[in-house]
Amino acid sequence: MDMDNFDQLTVSFDEETGNLRIAGISMMEDSLGFYAETKNKIDNYLLSHSCLVTVEFELTYFNSSSAKQFIQILSRLENNRGSVLWKYPKDNTIMKDRGKELEILLEVPFKFIPI
């Protein structure tokens, strides 16, 4: 197996529009450290902008430590501060279900998009 392709993850935050995109496979050992900068960027954006944050997930896999970080990221969007676009492979019900599990835990609107 080519591990370079297996570990590909894209995280990008547009500080003008408030759009955060997390795509690929999220299974790093230090997810707390990895997502710290992203959480800081969202905090700073919410302090200085009146616009909502949109988080677009397009993941094929994520581990439990990544899920904890996603909860911390998305909890910042509660109280009408943002929304989630959860894109998942249309033939992968597990990824849809993992998004539904996050939706249950948070007071953030989710939109599920099969791709």
Image (tube, rainbow, N blue to C red):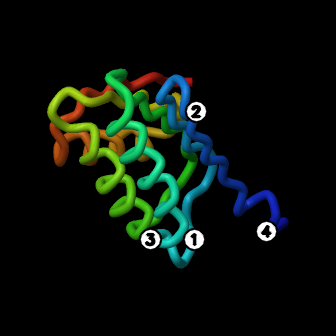
Tell me which numbered mark, 1 or 4, is placed earlier along the sequence: 4
Answer yes or no: do the residues labelled 4 and 2 have beta carbons within 8 Å?
no
Residue appearing at x 47%, y 63% in the figure? 36
State the SS at label 4: helix
| Residue under label 1 | 28
The kind of residue on which mark 4 rests is Met
Marks 4 and 3, how far apart at CA: 22 Å
The kind of residue on which mark 3 rests is Leu
Q: Quadrant of residue 22?
A: top right
User: Closer to the camera, 9 or 53?
Assistant: 53
Q: Position of residue 83 (x, y in %)?
A: 32, 28
Tell me which numbered mark, 3 or 2, is placed earlier along the sequence: 2
Farthest residue toward the bottom? Answer: 29
Image quarter where the C terminus lies is top right
Tell me which numbered mark, 1 or 2, is placed earlier along the sequence: 2
Mark 4 surroundings: few (<14), some (14-19) or many (≥20) residues within 10 A: few
Q: Quadrant of residue 84?
A: top left
The kind of residue on which mark 2 rests is Asp
Mark 3 surroundings: few (<14), some (14-19) or many (≥20) residues within 10 A: some
Mark 2 surroundings: few (<14), some (14-19) or many (≥20) residues within 10 A: few
| Residue under label 3 | 32
| Residue under label 4 | 3
Q: Position of residue 111 (x, y in %)?
A: 35, 23
User: Closer to the camera, 82 or 104?
Assistant: 82
Answer yes or no: do the residues labelled 1 and 2 have beta carbons within 8 Å?
no
Marks 1 and 3, how far apart at CA: 9 Å
> Which is more foreground, mark 1 or mark 3?
3
State the SS at label 1: loop
| Residue under label 2 | 14
